[in-house]
Image (cartoon, helix red, strand yellow):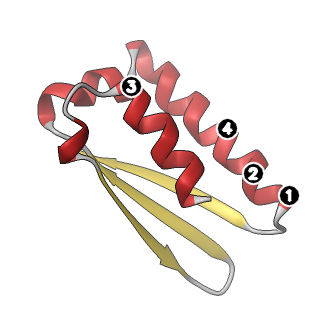
Amino acid sequence: MKDILETIILNLVENKEAVKIEEEQTEKEVILKVTVENSDMGRVIGKQGRIAKSIRTVMKSVAAKEGKKVSVEFIG
């Protein structure tokens, strides 16, 4: 799951070295924390949060196939 998210994020940002994805697992949920450079945050979130919402939708469908719940947080 982390690999899919990393592929999506790396294709959006300019500074690929600054991308960090941390994965925390609880009993019911997987939390993915995405850290990007401040200048790339707008690219990841998009206008009115559309790209971020789309990323979350894709990740929820991937998690559903694995029988899990996922939450994606973006940190600047």
**Quarter location, residue 26:** bottom right
Secondary structure, mark 1, is helix
Earlier residue among tags 1 and 3:
3
Q: Which residue is mark 2?
A: 62
Q: Are marks 2 and 1 in contact (CB under 8 Å)?
A: yes
Q: Position of residue 6 (x, y in %)?
A: 46, 47
Q: Residue furthest left?
A: 38
Residue 7 x/y as whole percent: 50, 41
Q: Up-down: is 8 above or below 24? A: above
Task: For the residues labelled 2 and 4, say whether their Cβ atoms are less than 8 Å apart.
Answer: no
The CA span between labels 1 and 3 is 25 Å
- Tell me the quadrant of the picture where the N terminus can be found: bottom right
* Rendered residue at 23%/25% (across/down): 14
Q: Secondary structure at mark 2?
A: helix
- Amino acid identity at mark 4: Thr
Query: What residue is shown with label 1?
Result: 65
Cα–Cα span, label 3 and label 2: 19 Å
Q: Which residue is mark 4?
A: 57
